[in-house]
Each structure stands twice: as structure tokens, then as C-alpha cells.
Amino acid sequence: MPKEELKFIEFLRNSGQKVTLARRKILEEVYRHHDHFNADDLYLRLQDHKANVSRATVYRTLSLLERCGLVRRLEGETRSLYEHVLGHPHHDHLICLRCGKILEFNNPRIEAMQLEVCKEFSFKMVTHSQQIYGFCRKCQSKHVSQS
Amino acid sequence: MPKEELKFIEFLRNSGQKVTLARRKILEEVYRHHDHFNADDLYLRLQDHKANVSRATVYRTLSLLERCGLVRRLEGETRSLYEHVLGHPHHDHLICLRCGKILEFNNPRIEAMQLEVCKEFSFKMVTHSQQIYGFCRKCQSKHVSQS
DNA sequence: TTTGTTGCAAACCATTTGCAGGGGT
DNA sequence: ACCCCTGCAAATGGTTTGCAACAAA
């Protein structure tokens, strides 16, 4: 049984909640791909795999997965984006304003600097997020107006 | 006439749009305070100042101000937060998970590092945002569970 | 006078929730 | 059995939009 499932089951048991078929299907689908998705993407993918799960349950389960640290939520323009956490080490994002592509990066020196900033403000960091918006290699070469 | 007003007028003229009373009142209110606000805060403040502007116009004007670079939008949990730009140099945010306080910081070394990351990915940065979530000095000392 | 703007109310849309029936322990 | 969970459909809440009256240019 994969690590993420063990972790989810432990979390549910510890908090007096139940391990249901719907929850297992959703977790499985979240960990099937290694990309960014929104609640509706996930709902549609579950449909494709003949898992009868309602949108409501998708939302409720994503919230559980977020609380137990198996999923990370990024605030998007209108809808939230999610990504799974296990086997997907911490990183930040480069987001293309034209094609929407998301690149991931991790820079230890930036992370170290952030800790220094926190020290300066006596701030206790729990988490952070960082997005760089601009144009990816492909979209730059298209000479498109940015309006 | 303040710089922000000149800039707004220029932007409107250049794009064939009109300088209206509502737009001027909204800009004035945005620049009256030096803090973070959401669309509804702004609407209510305008009410207090007897400026008869509808919520719809507040939203429409915030969008204009964002497009011409007089206002910056931060994606919040549910609603968007805004801050004015002129006289308020670029910075990022420390956000307290308990009391919601927002501290601002600016670290040139982090900024420089971000440019390096972009170079590495051949990415052309337009803007970026960075949030560090955690507990501010006051809230740490309250020994409160984080649940 | 022409054309963009406003207020209103309705529409939108992602997300949340109440409830009655169903499923895990 | 007990209590939690699910699906459904309705509610929510921030934001957007169609339209007729109105105000810049």
C-alpha cells in the first residue's frame, strides 16, 4: 500500500473519521498524476475512471487532504489549484502569463534568506509560497502583445 | 495634482477612456490610506465619504487601476486584496495565520536570486509575489494551538 | 452628438452546506 | 447499531455583466 494511503488512513483513524471508498478513490487519483489540478479537473478525471464521486465529496476530501498535508493548495486567479506533496519536494512556481504553463523551481539560497527575514521580524514561519509571473521561453519568441 | 492622478488620466486618455468623477473618487480613496484592502472595504469607505459609487464601479475601476499599474492585487483566501503602488515600493508579505496581520519586507538578495532563477529557465519575469505564512511576534507568545 | 460609463439587479461560478438515505466500524 | 459520509440540490458570496439612463468629450 502506497505511503500516501497509509498516511491518510492514519490521519482519518486518529481523528475519528472513516476510510471510505470515495476517499480512497480520490486520493488515488490525486497521486496518479504529477501535476497541478483544480477541483473540477479532479472530478472529471474521476468520472473517466468510472469512480462515482460527487463534486461535493471531491471538495470535502481535498480539504481533508490539505489538512493532513498530503496536498498543497495554491491560490489561483479564480479557482484554487492543488498539487500532491509526497514524492514531490517543496518548490515554488514560475507561471507563464500567456500559455498558463507552470514551471517548478527550488532555490535553497532563497529559502535560507526567507528564514533570515523571519528572524529579523521575530516571525515564526509555517509555510511560504512564491510565484514568478512572466513569459516562458516559447511564449517570448512569439512576440505577442501582453495586453 | 498628485502623481497617481496624472498617471491615471494619461492611461485613460491613451486608451480612449473617460476621466469620470467616480473614477477620480475611487483613486483618491485608494491613495488616502496606506494599507491592504478588499473591494468591499473600499466601497464602504467611499460610502463614508459620501461618494456615491456602486460596487460594480468599484470592481470595474480596481481592474483599470490594476491594468495601469497603480494598484497591485494579491490573491487572498476567498477575496482579493489590493494595495496601492505609488509611494509604496515593491515588497513581499509576512502574513500571520492567527491575527491576519500583514507585515511587509523587501530583501534585495532574494530579488536578485529570483532573476537568476529566471535566467536559468529562460523565463522573462513580469512580476512576482511571495508570501510567508506563520505567526507574528505577538501571536507566538500566546501559546495557541494552530488548529 | 457621440461614445464610453454608471447603477441596478440579475447572472456567474467556484465552493459550501442542509438533509435524508447509505455505508464503515 | 451507531455515527459518519455521500449525493443532491439549494445556498453562499465575491465578482461580473446586460441594459437603459447618463455624463464626458
Image (cartoon, coloured by chain):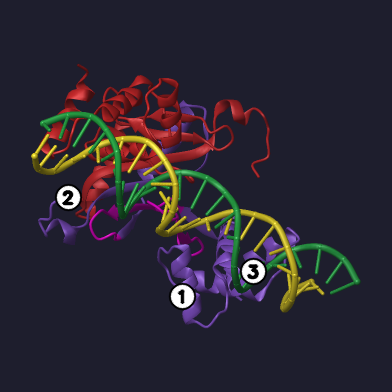
Chain colours: A purple, B red, C yellow, D green
Residue type at mark 1: give it. Answer: Arg
Tell me, yes or no, if residue A73 can be seen here. yes
Q: Earlier in the sequence, mark 2 or mark 1?
A: 1
Is A80 included in the stretch rendered in magenta? yes
Q: Residues within 10 Å of mark 3 (few under 14, many from 20)?
A: few
Q: Which mark is residue A146?
A: 2
Residue beneath disc 3: A6
Of marks 3 and 2, the one in the foreground: 2
Q: Quadrant of residue A26?
A: bottom right
Residue A62: x percent and y percent? 55, 61
Q: Chain of mark 1?
A: A
Horizontal side, residue B35 vs residue B3: left or right = right
> Alpha carbon of mark 3 to alpha carbon of mark 2: how far?
46 Å
| N-term mark: 3 or 1 | 3
Q: Quadrant of residue B38?
A: top left
Q: Is residue A1 above or below residue A72?
A: below
Residues in magenta? Answer: A74-101
**Disc 3 versus disc 1: nearer the observer:** 1
Q: Which residue is mark 1?
A: A45
The front one of B30 and A133 is: B30
Q: Which amino acid, by three-letter code, is at mark 3?
A: Leu
Report x, y in % for residue B19: 19, 30
Tag 2 near tag 1, CB within 8 Å: no
